[in-house]
Structure formats: structure tokens, C-alpha cells
Amino acid sequence: MSACLHDTRRDNIFIGGFMCSGKTSVGSELARRLGWTFTDTDRAIEERAGMTVPEIFSILGEPAFRRYEFAAVAGALEGSRQVVSLGGGALVNEELRGMVLSRAKLVILDVRPETVLSRAEKQKGARPLLDGGNVRALMIRRRPAYAHCHIRVATDEFPVSSVTDKILEDLYGTAAVLWSVESPFPGITGRDRSPAAAGRPSSPSWYREPSVPAHPQGTLPRR
Ligand code: S3P
């Protein structure tokens, strides 16, 4: 599927992919750069349940977690001008996957099993399905869940800032995007991609000169 600028899904970007692929780090950076709100569905579930994800798994069980997850993702799809990071298992649900694909831009972050293992090592106990589990086997089982998307980016050795750049480039043709609160149009920064060059009035009230700093965000993931 290719990226398309002018459709009704442009105001919702959902980030999916396997555990430890960097969904939260990239999602929050993307939201910051676009000036949109950021939601991490795992955090929304924790707030709703009054428990951490590992507690929900151990006390209520995985099916209960998946019910919370369905509600959280379906609820997030009602919003707009937001970046939403999904839990790694959310797209396994075919119905939910269809809903996300039809109502949002879906970005899949790809990651190698070795990367997952080394990142997970630093956050032991945070992900019940990684504790003692076979990461490679789970990744193979999950392949169909991540097979369809609008944009796909590998994150293994890339810093958050360059993964974010790549997503913005795929969506808007440039990583230098400022999205104003008042305007329905993205302010595309840079000389040859100014609003005027894009066929819009020069210097509209919402246009700001680019200030796109290098973002030394470190390497993935930062939760
Ligand atoms: C899960 C991924 C986790 C969290 C839960 C289940 C999964 O989120 O939703 O532990 O089934 O892959 P992250 O992908 O953010 O770690």
C-alpha cells in the first residue's frame, strides 16, 4: 500500500509492530514534530484498569487484557490529529487490524529478533509475553498481523530521529513538517517545499520558518 496525502486518514497515524520495535519512542517524537497529541494504548489501558500491563496479565489474564486493548484502540480511532502507539499484539485481532487500516495511516516498525532480545533485556518484567518466551517463534506467528500497512520502517540500528524523519518523508515528502492548529494543511518547511511552492498562499498566518533541529534522542527504545 502506498502513502497518500489527501485522504481522510491523514489526521491519525497509528504505530504498530513487534514488542521493542520502538513504537512509543517513535510515536511520541512523531507527535511532537507534528504538534499532534500522542497516545500509547498500553498506558491508556493501565489507566483504565488501574493496574500495570504485567498485573493485568497475571491477575485478570491475557483475554481480559485483549478486551481492554480492543476498547482502547477502537476509542483512539475516534480521535484526530494524533499519533497512537499500539501494543505489539493489537494488530493480531483481524477486526481491529481492519479498523486501523481503514481509518488511520498505519506505520509498522520492523525489528530483528536479536534487537528485541537486547532491548527487552534492559526492561525485564515489563512484557509478560517475552518472559521466557520464544521471540523468534512469536515473531513468525505474528507476521500476518504486521503484513499490511501504509508505511514500513526498520528500526534496528536507527535512532528515533531518523525513523521519524523517514515516516514524515513518506507521508509528506519531507521530514520538516509543522502542522498548525488552525490550518488543515501541513506547513511543509524547506526552500523548495514552502507553502507557496506547494500551491498555497505565501506566508499564511500559520506558516513558521523551519526550525528543525537535529534530535539527539538516543537509540531506541525509550519508553
Ligand atoms: C504485547 C505487547 C506489549 C503489551 C503487552 C502485550 C504483545 O506492548 O501490549 O505486553 O502481545 O505483543 P509493546 O509492544 O509496547 O511492548
Image (cartoon, helix red, strand yellow):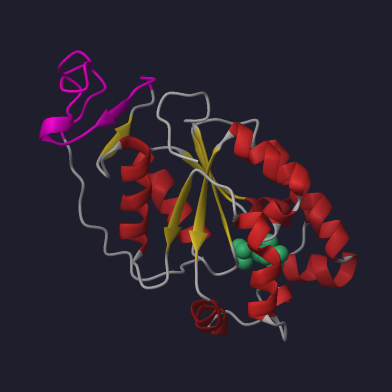
**Is 194 inside the magenta-drawn segment?**
yes
Q: In the picture, residue 42 is in which quadrant?
A: bottom right
- Whether 116 is drawn above or below 24: the answer is below
Magenta stretch, overall SS:
loop
Q: Please state if 206 lies on the left or on the right of 54 as rendered.
A: left
Using the image as rendered, state which of residue 223 and residue 175 is in the foreground.
Answer: 175
- The residue sitting at the left extreme is 191
Query: Can you give x and y, in whole percent of width and height, for residue 74 in the image?
Result: 72, 39
Q: How many marks?
A: 0
| Residue range corresponding to the magenta coloring | 182-209
Using the image as rendered, state which of residue 2 and residue 44 is in the foreground.
Answer: 2
Rendered residue at 10%/33% (across/down): 191
Query: Can you give x and y, in whole percent of width and height, for residue 103 in the image?
Result: 61, 32
Residue 8 seen in render: yes
Ligand 1: give its quadrant: bottom right
**Is 121 inside the magenta-drawn segment?**
no
- Whether 182 is drawn above or below 101: the answer is above
Rendered residue at 73%/43% (across/down): 96
Rendered residue at 38%/46% (across/down): 32
Query: Can you give x and y, in whole percent of width and height, for residue 120 in the image?
Result: 57, 79
Residue 87 seen in render: no
Rendered residue at 67%/50% (across/down): 44
- Whether 141 is drawn above or below 205: the answer is below
Query: Can you give x and y, in whole percent of width and height, for residue 60 in the image?
Result: 89, 64
- The residue sitting at the top extreme is 201
